[in-house]
Amino acid sequence: MKIVTWNINGIRARLGNFTHWLRESSPDIACLQEIKCSDDQFPRAEVEALGYNVETFGQKGFNGVAILSKLPFDEVNRGLPGDDGDEQARFIEGVFSTKSGALRVASIYLPNGNPLGSEKFPYKLAWMSRLECWATERLGLEEPLVLAGDYNVIPEPIDARFPENWVNDALFQPETRQAFRRLENLGFTEAVRSLTDAPLIYTFWDYQAGAWQKNNGIRIDHLMLSPEAANLLASGSIEKHVRAWEKPSDHVPVSVELSLDPA
C-alpha cells in the first residue's frame, strides 16, 4: 500500500499538475497540506473521477488539509485536540480497513513558527506538544499509524543544503528539533531516514534565488510510522521530479510502501 504526503501549496492553482501526478504515482492514500480552500471549493469531482474518496478540513485562502483514498473511510476526525480555540485547519485523521486490521493515517500541516519573537513560535511549540499528547494516546491502540505531513521541521543539519542559513529560523530552532525528537522517542520511525542516510535529499526548494536549480533545499516533509507501521515498511521515495513541472509546488511528494492489503 502506497501512502504519500504532499504540501500542494494551493490545490486549485495546481489542479492539472495534481491530477497528472495522481495518475502517474497512483497512491492508495494521499495526504495533502496547504490546500488553501474551503471544503466546498475543493475540486472533489475531478479527484473522485480518478477513483478516490475525499475528506477535507479546509480553510479559505490558507492552511487546509485533506486525505484522498482508494479505500473507503471508516472514520474521519478533524482538528488536533487540546485547544478548542484553535481555528486553523491543520489536522485530519482517517481510519481504514485492511486485511490485517485498522490503519490510521493523519495529514498534518505543522505551524511554520516564524518570525521568532512573535506569537507564532510559541503557537508552533504548543501545537507540537498537542500532537505529542494525541500521538501518545493513539499509540496505545497498537495499530499501524502514519503521521504524514509538512512538519516545518529540519531535523538535522544534513537535512539542509546550507544549515547555517537556518539558525535563526523557527524550522531549525533547538526547541523545534527537540519536539520532533520527542515524537521519535515515543516510538515513531521517521521513514526516509530509516531507509537512507544519504545527504542532499530534500523535499522543499524555495521559489527564490534559483534554489531548485542549485539544489538549495531542505527536508521538512516527513512520514512518521508507529512501531506497527514501521514493521510493515517496504520502501520509500521522494518524488523530486515533480518540482521541475510547470507551476510547481515548492514541496514534492514523499511516499512509503507498506506491506498491507485492503480489506
Image (cartoon, grey):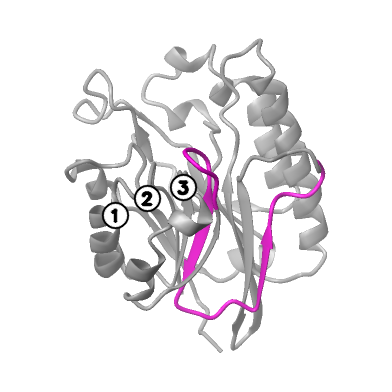
- Crowd band around label 1 with a 10 angstrom C-alpha radius: few (<14), some (14–19), many (20+): some
Q: Can the viewer see residue 202?
A: no
The amino acid at mark 2 is Ile
Q: Amino acid at mark 3?
A: Cys
**Mark 3: few, some, or many residues within 10 Å (few <14, many ≥20)?**
many
Question: Does the magenta segment cover residue 175?
Answer: no
Residue behind mark 1: 15
Residue behind mark 2: 11
* Image location of residue 77, percent across then percent down: 69, 62
The nearer-to-camera label among 3 and 1 is: 3
Question: Looking at the picture, does residue 217 appear above or below residue 242?
Answer: above
Q: Residue shown at 52%/31% (left/top)?
A: 154
Under circle 3, the secondary element is loop
* Left or right of 180 in this view: 71: left
Horizontal placement of 135 versus 200: left or right? right
Q: Quadrant of the C terminus?
A: bottom right
Magenta residue span: 58-83
Q: Relative to 21, is 242 above or below?
A: above
**Secondary structure beneath label 1:** helix
Label 3: which residue? 37
Asked if the residue at tag 1 contacts the one at tag 2, i.e. Cβ–Cβ closer than 8 Å, the answer is yes
* Mark 3 or 2, nearer chain start: 2
Tags 3 and 2 touching, CB below 8 Å: yes
